[in-house]
Image (cartoon, rainbow, N blue to C red):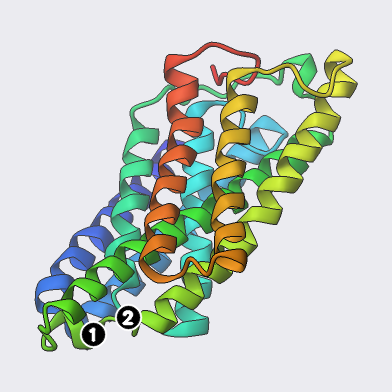
Amino acid sequence: MVTILFELALTFYFAAAIVSVMELFRGTKTTSRFVLTFAVIGFLIHTANIIARYVIAGHIPITNLHEASSFFSWCIVLLFFFLEYRYRLGLLGSFIMPVVFILMLSSSMLPRKIEPLSPVLQSYWLGIHTVLAFLGDAAFAMAFGIGIMYLLQEHYVKSKRLGGLFQRLPSLQILDEINYKLITLGFPLLTLAIITGALWAESAWGSYWRWDPKETWSLITWFIYALVLHARLTAGWRGKRAAILSIIGFAAVLFTFFGVNLLLKGLHAFK
């Protein structure tokens, strides 16, 4: 049942991603509704999959790379729905749903076996630390999508191509403001994730910080987004610079998530 639910969610996310890409070229109200409908159905099935794994495992299912990638995707879609409801951006799904599908596709290729928790993970910090981290990363993923939209819209403005896709994308001011709000949401969540991770490490290993590869790259990611906020507040870095930095920051997020786990060995490596 768990496998079936996951595959169904993957299928609907795939449909949403395909239609969302089509929407870039020949978007209509119908295609927008299809993107949202497929995403909602996929999300509901995905939620059922996560709940089923939780019931079977007896703990939040984020303890291997398959589960973590799946949960990361779930958080991104959740935030996508919030932004759609709050801002009615239009075309946001075209920049987010392909990312969600790629993450879910990556998750589908990884071992899915549900295993008992190792002693070090049997802590209330597991849910607190990891959920904070994934929600923060989801905010950065959305900022990445908004950053791409900003650069695309800026290209149309500078080239004075004011028809077609230009008219369907939000204004540069709105995109810049939402990018900033997303980073101001993700940054404190990442900060709390690092703090709770340090507290968990102290209780588990007797040391707050061990310069583990994931700890190191989490800190690098934190500094990148701290730079984004600092530069915006003190040097007035807005618009294009902020969009580029949000894209670079998400690249660091992805390396911290996938690169560290697949290429580097450490205490935080998923099995």
Indicate the secondary structure of the residue bearing disc 1.
helix
Residue 47 visible in rendering: no
Which residue sits at x=44%, y=32%?
255
Of label 1 and label 2, which has the lower sequence position? 2
**Is 259 above or below relative to 106?**
above
Query: Which numbered disc covers residue 20?
Result: none
Image coordinates for residue 163, horizontal then vertical, percent: 11, 88
Labelled pair 1, 2 in contact (Cβ < 8 Å) = yes
Amino acid on which disc 1 is placed: Arg
Image coordinates for residue 181, horizontal then vertical, percent: 57, 70
Which residue sits at x=31%, y=44%?
102
Say which residue label 1 marks: 168
Say which residue label 2 marks: 90
**Quadrant where the image shows the C terminus:** top right
Which residue sits at x=39%, y=66%?
146
Image coordinates for residue 90, horizontal then vertical, percent: 32, 80
Indicate the secondary structure of the residue bearing disc 2.
loop
- Could you give the CA–CA distance between mark 1 and mark 2, rounded to whole angstroms? 7 Å
Residue 31, picture quadrant: bottom left
